[in-house]
Image (cartoon, rainbow, N blue to C red):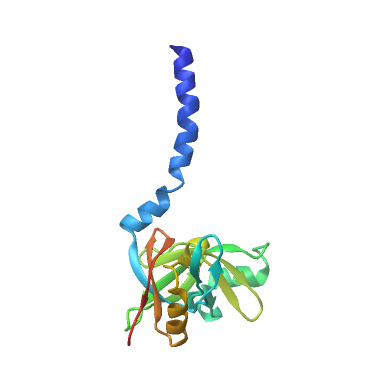
Amino acid sequence: MKNLMKYLIVMIIPLAVLLSRPAVPLMTLTFGQEVKLSTVPFDPRDFFRGDYVELSFAIENIEFDMISESLLSGLQEGRYKGGNIEVYVSVKPDSAGIYNAVLVSDAPPADDIYIRGKINARQDSARINYGNNLSRFYVRENTGLELEEAARKGQVHALAKVWKGFIILDTIEISTE
């Protein structure tokens, strides 16, 4: 009986680790708040996976006046070494329903929708990296060029889900406005 219990524990631990990996993305897609982001894509092609759109977002480039005073002073004083510091970007919708960054801080906000990312600040600019869940979107075969053309006209928006700072790209829409 003791040997059986040992074998069960040895089998359950790796299984639990494997099953826990998709838990946060699944929770984000299920319970997340939908946000609409403006994009600037280009259209590459992956030989093995087909067409995809590599996305860049307006909320990735941050003005220094959006950075909280505590985070900005820490960046200027050199308290954060290594360049990539975890930050929380508060986002709010504009009149068109597009979510834009309004505040970047080193602590999660209490009331706003926020996205976790890593800031890389230079003397004249700051860029936020939100991770791999937001950068690539695979599309049906031979539809990538259509998305690229619509992006040149400013008609492409990404719909993403945000849950407790974690963001997942849900779909891309082409608006005809």
Q: Spot the residue most to the top.
A: 1
Q: How many marks?
A: 0
- Observer-nearest of 101 and 34: 34
Q: Quadrant of residue 153?
A: bottom left
For residue 164, which quarter of the picture? bottom left
Quadrant for the C terminus in the image = bottom left
Vertical placement of residue 15 versus 138, above or below: above
Q: Position of residue 83 (x, y in %)?
A: 65, 65
Question: x%, y% of residue 166?
Answer: 43, 59
Q: Residue at x 61, y 79 (%)?
A: 125
Residue at 59% over, 75% down: 126
Residue 133: % across, % down: 48, 61
Residue 135 to residue 97: above or below: above
Please name the residue shown 45% across and 82% down the image: 151
The N terminus appears in which quarter of the rendering?
A: top left
Q: Position of 84 compared to 132: left or right? A: right
Q: Position of residue 127 (x, y in %)?
A: 57, 73
